[in-house]
Every structure is written in structure tokens, then in C-alpha cells.
Image: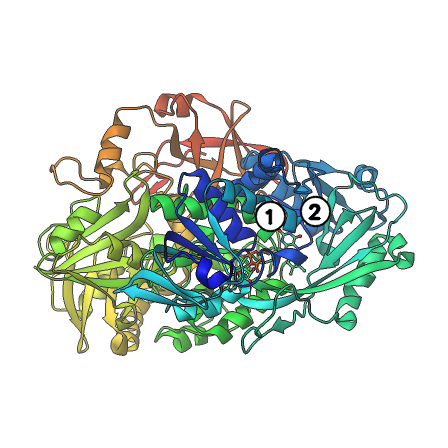
Amino acid sequence: MNATTDLPKEARIVIIGGGIIGCSTAYHLAQMGCSDVLLLEKHRLTSGSTFHAAGLVGQLRTNANITQLLGYSVELYRKLEQETGLATGWKMNGGLRLACNADRWIEVKRQATTAHSFGLEMHLLTPREAQDLWPVMDISDLVGAAFLPTDGQANPSDITQSLASGARKGGVQIRENVEVTGFEFDGDTVRAVETDAGRVRCEYAVICAGQWSQQLGRLAGVDIPLVSVQHQYLVTEAIAGVAPDLPTLRDPDRLTYFKEDVGGLVMGGYEPNPIPWAEDGIPDGFNFTLLDNDWDHFEPLMQQAIARVPALADAGIRQMYNGPESFTPDGNFILGEAPERNKLFVGAGFNAFGIASGGGAGMALAEWVHKGAPPFDLWPVDIRRFGQPHRDIEWVRRRTLEAYARHYTMAWPFEENTSCRPSRRSPLYETLRARGACFGEKLGWERPNWFAGSPEAARDEYGFGRQNWFDAVGREHRAARERVVLFDQSSFAKYRVSGPDAARALSWICANQVDVAVGGVVYTQMLNPRGGIECDLTVTRVGADEFYLVTGTGFATHDFDWIRRQLPPGGDVRIDDVTTAWAVLSLMGPKSRDVLQPLVRDDLSHENFPFARMRELSILGARLRALRVSYVGELGWELHVPVESALTVYQALMAVGADHGIVDAGYRAIESLRLEKGYRAWGADIGPDYTPLEAGLGWAVDLSSGKDFIGRAAILEQRQQPLKKSLACFTLPDPEVLLLGRETLYRDGERVGWLSSAGWGYTVGANIGFGYVRRADGVDRVFLESGSYELEVAGERFACQWQPGPLYDPGMLRMKC
Ligand SMILES: Cc1cc2nc3c(=O)[nH]c(=O)nc-3n(C[C@H](O)[C@H](O)[C@H](O)COP(=O)(O)OP(=O)(O)OC[C@H]3O[C@@H](n4cnc5c(N)ncnc54)[C@H](O)[C@@H]3O)c2cc1C
């Protein structure tokens, strides 16, 4: 039967792409009971990147849920053959990771601790022990190694065929040689896909088209920021000493990886000078196709590999592969419902770990489509993590090449990207630069991290100890506590929600009471139906029918998308992104009133301008919104200033502030200050997997007024049960220890969680860490205070103290460590 006559006219869910991701998504949809699923593949299954993957399956990532996703892949690959009858080539031979210098050894030890935090076994080995597992390697330069016994390897094409077979058995229809050429929408909701064999009406479309996804997304009006990059590896003839159970090996200091293959070795790596491919679009007919080998480009990796495995020098080369693969600007893949459309999903951009992720990513994507929400928080891979710069494919390419080149370089704490900068600049950028700002970058925005004083250089020097900015941030921190500082927070995402139904809509979406008098500022979470925290922001009522919402820079797309989708249908309410209309100058510290008061006619006394209020003020002709709020635990105002007046207002504040010792301060000081005050950070301490009750934010949930809101029922129900996890604060005074987050938390010797965020508190003089304490039977205050705690940091355990509340309150220092 030819494809045209055979093609169904309708399917509830159409998956585009028959690589491992499309087939895994189809398989899992079938497992979930969705049989009205059609998978379309423009050529043959596996003909994209999947057929030429090397097949290493590693699990450990820096995020617990993504690690869990990869762990799910391993579980699935273990049992798939039994279920479908098709071999997958799965071997759980473990994975080794080498360290050849002191810094790498710290990194590897920290990775082992992260593995322990996430419940993965990972052992630290001496060079000799590593060699026992990998006899063909030279260990003369080794400092140590780590071994993850449940890692493994598989045959990518076989796994994919096995998944496809499972999907077919579950009722999924698979059509090869059908190319999707366009989309039809009803408003913003997908209605059909167009193909070279006719139109297929559908309720959902899922783009799993590998490196073609970016082009396909454009046809749908959706930005999928990925580009193709060449990736090479070779396969040798048999080598003496290479046994079938040889673990996979990653040798980051030599930029290379290895796995066993029919008695020989697969060897590939990440060049520091990656070569982009198909910059003008992928040529037609690129199926089951490899690129020409580029020996010159590969040779430096080959030299590194021979130094590690001397037998490679004499081994015959069976084949060399140069395959293009899709990579993304931050090295993570892309999952979720496209924010520009409804019911159009994406699973793409797998950065050369699509085989490792395939099982878990397909499961998560299937559940996202089927239930309208992912199984757990997937923020690091969520398509809504991108923003304005990611719509420019040249920006995406340059940033992606940087990420590729850094795949195996040291992952320094606090490391910043260097490409494509500066892109988005606050009106104060040049001024702050001249005053010594060392900038970091978020979603394209340049943001001061800290300010160098003379003769310091405004440049981060990376390392695993205290870095060069430590003292400078301490100065800013103390100035905020003792005098007054100014933070440029212009990159905050800001939305205007307006219309006659705005108050009603926001009351439904927000957990706190936001239907307040004009001028009220409300800190609130927005919850999902499970009670998990989707957004964490302030809502200011600026008029009877108008609200001004302010959230974190990185959440611009995510929070806008969440709010837009929750607006009750048929209501007269709209949301507009007004981020670029307002600069934000945050004036914080005990002297902030003394600085602001002389510049305005209004009475700024506490009685007249209390906490959580907004007033419009005028400074030198600028009409601005002053919000009396704080994320650092001091008296202060966020001044939201029309962009064109930002510099004028900044200069006025600095001029008056000079008499009060005002200084510029940056984001690293904010982090230290907020840790002391116990303010939560979304994406670290709170997120969709945590409820306000678990996060200690129950006070910000309005259960008393009787208003209904998304997640209310879940919160009420949770109130009846013991909490299974609870966010807690810990201190560790030893300044030689560096807490960064992800350190393993033990209570009375038993693993109970890990740190969600951490840093140094300059006022309290200790490391501060926040983390959830987990226990199936419930966690309450008695349980928390009756335990003795330790933190595992880079493989070593240190005693730490549980702290009952915020460590710092102005006028009341509660610190006891
Ligand atoms: C050299 C190399 C080595 C690698 N090694 C590893 C490894 O060791 N471990 C690991 O985990 N990963 C590895 N990878 C990565 C892995 O191969 C990919 O991440 C994975 O195969 C991606 O799967 P996918 O389904 O997203 O894309 P693909 O396999 O590319 O599938 C996409 C499919 O969509 C189809 N398609 C595109 N457009 C359309 C359209 N308009 N209509 C219909 N169909 C369409 C394509 O034909 C293609 O079959 C490696 C990659 C390379 C290049």
C-alpha cells in the first residue's frame, strides 16, 4: 500500500519523527492507554541521528529529576527486550569517570556526592582500582576516578525498533516515508498536520524531529532553539584486553569517551572548536547519511586517546563516523508544550545524550501530552526556559558552539557564558561598568554580579575554593545590612494584567489574596492542581482593573505562559509583557529612607508608606512606581522607573546616598542576603514539586477568606496529613568548606535529602544551606529538632546545625552557630 492511500485522515495525537524520542513517546502513550496515536517518519525509523549514535548510557546530571529521568531509561532498557522480544543490546557494565588533576578530582568527588544525594551508587576509586576495571588504560597521570555501576550501553537502533514494536502492539500506527510539511491551527490551537501524503486532522502534534525540529517549528510559528553540530567517533578492530563487560569511560581532561564494541573500542570526544553543520538548512534527502570524515579535526582527540589507551596506536580502524546531531545553547534537551501554541509539544535537541535520555524523555513527554502536565518538575529541560535571544538562530548557534566546546571542560562553580555578550542591557549598563561591575548573564540580560574596587579587576577567577570576588561581595553585603545599597534589577520580568475581569482571574490563579485595595503589593505563589508552586512573584494592584506582576528574569517565558493558560476562558482580561518598559532600581538597607526621602515630596514614614504598599512617586520629572518590598531582609524600595529616566533617578539616588555610604551591589550579594533571611528561590528551593506547606510558605496561602484558587483542594488535603518533606535551614560555620547546593544531607547517619541552595552568609559568618528533609512517615518540627545532621561535601562528611527560622532579622540576630 502506498503512503498516500494508507495514511489515516485523523488521529488524536500525531508524533512527528521516528527516532528514539518519537518512538519512545509513542511507546509510552500506548502504555498509558492512548491508542489513537499516529507516528509519521519522513524516511525510515532511526534514519536521523539515532542510527549513528555511539550508545553510551550515563545517568548522572546536576538536577535530581533529570537524573531520575535517565535512571528511568536504564530501568526501561533493562526490561524492554523481555517485553517486546526485540534485542536492545543493553549492557549494564557501569561507567568510569577519570580525574587527572586536583581540580578535576574535586569536581569528580562533588559529582559522586551529587549522585549520593540523588540515590545513585557512585564509588570513588584509586587509579589502580580504576585500572583493574579498565586494564587497557594508562594511569600514570590519574589522580582518581569514580565508578557508577548502573550506567551502561545499548544499541540505539535496536532500542528504537524495540520501542516502536511495543508502540505498535499498543495500537500506535507508524507510517514511514511520510513527511510533515506544515500545520493548521484553530486560533493558536493545532488542528491538523499537512504531509506530502495528505492532511491529518489531530488534537495534538508532537515534534520529535531531531535536528529538523527547528525548521519544523518555524512552520508552526514556534521557536525551538537548536542547531546541528558535527560529532565524530571511531570504532576499532578488536584490541587485546578489551572485554565485553568493560565499563564505559569518560576522560574529560582528555576530552574523550570510550565504550566496548565487539572486542574493540568506540572512541569519540568533544573538540574545543566544534564545527556547525547545515547553517542554511538541512539538505533534502539527508537520511541514513553520514558526513565526510574530518581527520584533521579529530586528530587532537586521537592523540589524547592514544595517551590514555596506548594500544589504540596500533589498532585497526573499523569505521569512523561523522554524524550531525542537534545541540542547544545550554546543553540540555527541550521538552514541553510550545509557549506560542496550544497542544503542540516538542521533544528535541538531545545534545548527544538522546539514547541515554530516550526512555525517560519519552515517558515524560507522553505524560505531558496525555495528562497536560509532566510527571514531575522538568525545569532544566522545559521549553519555557528560553526567551528573547533564543529566537535569533545566529545567537543560538554561537552560544550552542560554546556549550559544546565546554562539554568536558571543568564545570566551575559560578561559571558564566562568554559568547554573544552583551546582548540585552539595562540603561545603567555603561554607568555600572565604569563603576567596576562584573556582569553575569541571564536570558541575554547583562546583570551586575559584583563590583570590583580599586585595584581589583572586574573579572571572575574560577576555582573550587573561595573565588576572587568573595571579599567584594562581603563589602556589598555589609553595606546592605549597615547602610544602603543599590541593585540594578531591570531584567526582572514584568507583566500588566488588565481588564474588568483581571481581579477575578488573578484571584483564581494566585494562592494569596490579591484582590486588595489599589496600591497593595502581594507576595504570592501560583499553584498547580497538585498544590505545587508554578510561579513565585509579587502582584501589585495599580488600578481597579489593572495589576502589575514582577517575577524573576529567568522565568519570563515560563510565568507568562502559565498565567496566560490559566486565565479563565471568556473573561475580559489580558496579559501583556511590559518587561522592557521599566527599569528597576532596588534601594535597600537601613538608610534607604534617608536617601529616598529628600528626593520626593511624599511622606515615606512607615506610618504613611508601610511594607507591601506601592505608591507613585516623582523624581526629577520621572513618574515611578515605588514598591516597599525586599528580598534581602532590609528596609527598602524597588523603584520601577520608566526606562528613559533610569539614569536620571540612579544619579539622583547616588548623589544623595553619598552622605550615607551608598554603594552599588550585585546579584551575588543578593544571594547571600536572601539566604540569611530565608527567602526561597524558585527553581532551587521551590517549584512545581513542592507545595507552600512543604516550603514553609503556608502563611502566603489564603485559606481563610474562602476564595477558591488553583491548588486549594490539594493544600487543604495536605493539611490533614503529615508532611513527607519539609524545607529546612542548616548552617556549617567552617569557612574552608564551600557549599554550592546538591550536598547530601544526613540525619542521624541516614540520608534524608540534599541542599537545594547554599552559600556564605557574611553577617552570620557561616555557610547556609537549604534543603528538604524527607521521610515517608512525616517530617515535623519535633523530628527536625531532634536529629543530628551532617552534610556530605565532595565525599567528606561535616557536622551541621539545623536552624529553626530565618538566621537574620533586622534588630534580632538569631544566629547561634
Ligand atoms: C556521532 C554521534 C554519537 C552519539 N553518541 C551518543 C551516545 O553515546 N549516547 C547517547 O545517549 N546519545 C548519543 N548521540 C545522540 C543521539 O544519537 C541523539 O540524541 C538521538 O538519536 C536523537 O534522537 P531523536 O529522536 O531526537 O532524533 P533523530 O534520531 O534524528 O530522529 C528524528 C526523526 O525525525 C524525522 N523527521 C524530521 N523531519 C520530519 C518531518 N518533517 N516529517 C516526518 N519525519 C521527520 C527524521 O527523519 C528522523 O528520523 C550521538 C549522536 C551522534 C551524532
| Relative side of 745 to 129, left or right | left
User: Residue 429: x and y, percent?
Assistant: 40, 74
User: Residue 232: x and y, percent?
Assistant: 71, 63
Residue 408 visible within the image: no
Label 2 near ligand 1 (CB < 8 Å): no
The tag earlier along the polypeptide, 1 or 2, is 2
Viewer-closest of 181 and 199 = 199
Which quadrant holds residue 50?
bottom right
Which residue type carries mark 1?
Answer: Gln
User: Residue 613: x and y, percent?
Assistant: 16, 55
Which residue type carries mark 2?
Answer: Trp
Q: Residues within 10 Å of mark 1 (few under 14, many from 20)?
A: many
Query: Which residue: 67% across, 70% down?
Result: 273
| Relative side of 453 to 709, left or right | right
Mark drawn on residue 655: none
Which of the four quarters of the rendered structure image does ligand 1 lie in? bottom right
Query: Which residue: 19% across, 65% down?
Result: 625
Viewer-closest of 425 and 197 = 197
Q: Residues within 10 Å of mark 2 (few under 14, many from 20)?
A: many
Which quadrant holds residue 283?
bottom right
Tag 1 residue: 161
Whether residue 519 is situated above or below residue 813 in the rendered picture: below
Mark drawn on residue 105: 2
Viewer-closest of 798 and 454 = 798
User: Residue 555: x and y, percent?
Assistant: 36, 57
Residue 575 visible within the image: yes
Which quadrant holds residue 579?
bottom left
- The quadrant in which the C terminus is found is top left
Query: Which residue: 26% across, 78% down?
Result: 644
Q: CA distance from mark 1 to mark 2?
A: 39 Å
